[in-house]
Image: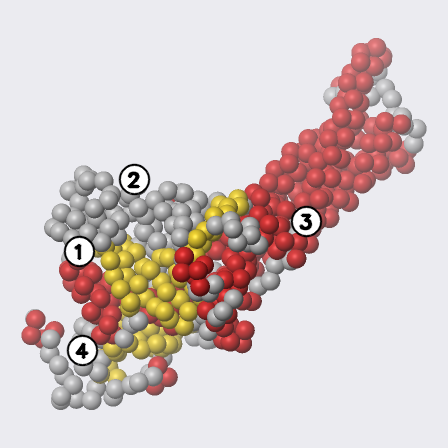
Amino acid sequence: MEQMLNLDVSPITDKIIAEYIWIGGSGIDLRSKSRTISKPVEHPSELPKWNYDGSSTGQAPGEDSEVILYPQAIFKDPFRGGNNILVICDTYTPQGEPIPTNKRYRAAQVFSDPKVVAEVPWYGIEQEYTLLQTNVKWPLGWPTGGYPGPQGPYYCGVGADKSFGRDISDAHYKACLYAGINISGTNGEVMPGQWEFQVGPSVGIEAGDHIWCARYLLERITEQAGVVLSLDPKPIEGDWNGAGCHTNYSTKSMREDGGFEVIKKAILNLSLRHRDHISAYGEGNERRLTGKHETASIDTFSWGVANRGCSIRVGRDTEKNGKGYLEDRRPASNMDPYVVTSLLAETTLLWEPTLEAEALAAQKLALKNNAEKYSYVSLQDFSQAMASGAGKSAAFALLVLNVILYFIIIAIAAWAVNHGIERSHETASVLSLPARIFPIYYPFGNMATGFVVSLSLIAGVVGFTTSITAINNVIQWNVPNLHAAATSSLISWLLTMLAMGFACKEIDIGWTESNLRTLETILILVSGTQLFCTAAIYIGVDDAVARDRTYL
């Protein structure tokens, strides 16, 4: 077997083996299959498209399962040697549409934008990973079901009791160099059994291609070693470091004189889109970004010079030289590099905040005060800045107004109920059925008053409660919260319209007290404000869904 695996066929044939590699249905798993190519190739355009059964990877239905592979990047194959190659592909429907797990397509659009091309974005990605024992899925070198000594001696450690899996790390290092991956280093990590390799600096889409190919090589090497590769961002709970994929980033303007000011502007933009980035930075990241173990809290954006407890770290050399790069420490080890790299470029080069949001964020982040090295701002502090969007600010203002109006409705309706109970005690006994069994007899107003007051009380309580809840949902301004706010707002509006309908009938009949006329007026008013509020929230849902489709 070993002889066949090491057999070099290049002296006797021009044919080569191309290993087509693609991302599977989970968005993190890698798949591959081989085919024979008639002669050596130097560019992906020389390779044919191919297909696979997408129903077996969770990427297509069984009745229409064909997914098409488009070759995008070529690397030398360190396993087969010779002229054999590894081919990074992205995935499309037979009609040529990118499938949902094809994040490379969107990234390529961002990196082909003239503004991005002109800035030549560089990326250096630090991929952390954990090696697990095959049978027990427990870190390599750890006693089965037990724990090693506390963290401290393992980071860049040397020795059989400190370093576990060095042969895998070294084999992977050499395989990457052979393949042509721009790997720049490796090291043992803080948690025993955890390692890191760095790729870069790479320009644009190339960073994603190189990371995915490096991950493929690592999967193959651990497969041969009988070890399981884990990209879980927090493989072991407790006082152990998680696994991240810190992404170092710079543009041409950042690398030139005066670049530190450009970096601070980029940090400002990143702060305003913190939630967008967090949602795109890997699954399970909330277990890692706790504010401990060299991480920032997932709910708080922060930046600092030489501070590894921040969301964004700036090196001391960058501060000293007035130019350089920033490090985004938020991405998880299982992040998609196409998503992270393109989103960094999108946010810092193509997206512009409103002036109000920019001013508030700059103040809170102390970006205009060079003396302040470490600055923090919570997401709650950003509510005013983020509310500068027309839809969000309108919904927020209308919700606050509705809280007040619904409270007044509750107060008047409650007064009417109480007043009716007291008056009906004296007069209702002389009434015949069915008036006597009406839930509350109202010996004032007219025949529609009972319906108006009862429905107003229900609409007021529901509207007041849902408006309070919706305020929090609107502040969050993401798809799940906005869906909840939109549904509750629509229900409140329908109840309010029902009460308003009977109020109009009460007005038509005439002869009501002043308090009831006030109730009628407010019902008509709040039916309009609630309608506008519902519309603003539904617009927000559409925007949030479109945003998530764009970034994810």
- Mark 1–mark 3 CB contact (< 8 Å): no
Q: Nearer the viewer, residue 518 or 428?
A: 518
Q: Nearer the viewer, residue 399 or 376?
A: 376
Vertical side of 437 occupied by 354: above or below: below
Mark whose residue sits in front, 4 or 2: 2
Vertical side of 111 occupied by 449: above or below: above
Give percent across and percent down for residue 307.
40, 50
Q: Residue furthest right?
A: 511
Numbered disc 1: secondary structure? loop
Q: Quadrant of residue 22?
A: bottom left
Label 3 sits on residue: 393
Q: Amino acid at mark 1?
A: Gly
Q: Amino acid at mark 4?
A: Gly
Give percent across and percent down for residue 83.
21, 83
Numbered disc 3: secondary structure? helix
Label 1 sits on residue: 165
Label 4 sits on residue: 81
Comes first in the chain, label 1 or label 3: 1
Q: CA distance from mark 3 to mark 4?
A: 60 Å
Comes first in the chain, label 1 or label 2: 1
Count the numbered circles shown. 4
